[in-house]
Amino acid sequence: ELKVSMPSSWNKKIEQTILMKSLSFSEYEMISHPVVVLNVVSSSDVDPLLCMQELLSIHHLPLSLSTGQYDSEIYRVYVVLHDINDTKHVDPNAVYRRLQSKFPASQTRLLCINSLSIEAQNLQQPDMWSKYKIPICFPQNVPCIDSNTIRPVNPINGNIVIGSRLSLEDQMNIRDFCVALYQQDVIPSLERRISALTRTVSDT
């Protein structure tokens, strides 16, 4: 009889490392072709709909997608990111409805963050992000953080605080967003791609 014991913390760390590596890809690998592209606009943009349409332009795609190395017709998810405290004058649901009128409703999402004001931010927010960081793909397309940006610091240990304005509700919303993205978009898109590749192999 086989008995399976609970993994130790060392094994758990290895499992997490393997999992995160499996979610990354190299720009030269076709086997790791990305299955979903997130197009994200801010609700504070002057015209979020126009910004989203601009993001769809081929010159905003990474080079390997625009040159044909990867399929540019990747499944897309259209996201409105709403900063609750910085854009109080904006109705995020109105922006969300506008996007739904132009893009497939099933592929449109609204994510609200930063419920805590600067005055009420949590400077002792635990770091739940660093362990999930993976190598940046297409780094030439990633904007740099302004060196003059003031970043919150934990007064106890002096570390930079990531997500200091996220309330518990915000964190739960992010979790739900990620779960829905995985279940409703990533898995179905991956299944469609495998099915298409299977048909291609069968027809050759």
Image (cartoon, rainbow, N blue to C red):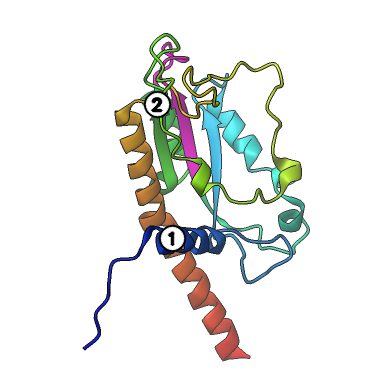
Magenta highlight range: 77-91
Where residue 29 sits: x, y (%)? 69, 68
Q: Quadrant of residue 203?
A: bottom right
Where residue 17 sits: x, y (%)? 51, 59
- Residue 2 falls left or right of residue 68: left
Image: 52 above or below 154 = below
Residue indicated by mark 1: 10
Name the residue nearer the viewer: 1 or 86: 1
Q: Secondary structure at mark 2?
A: loop
Please name the residue shown 39% across and 19% down the image: 91
Residue indicated by mark 2: 166
Q: Secondary structure at mark 1?
A: helix
- Upstream in the sequence, badge 2 or badge 1? 1
Image: 70 above or below 197 = above
- Magenta region includes residue 81: yes
Tell me the quadrant of the picture where the N terminus can be found.
bottom left
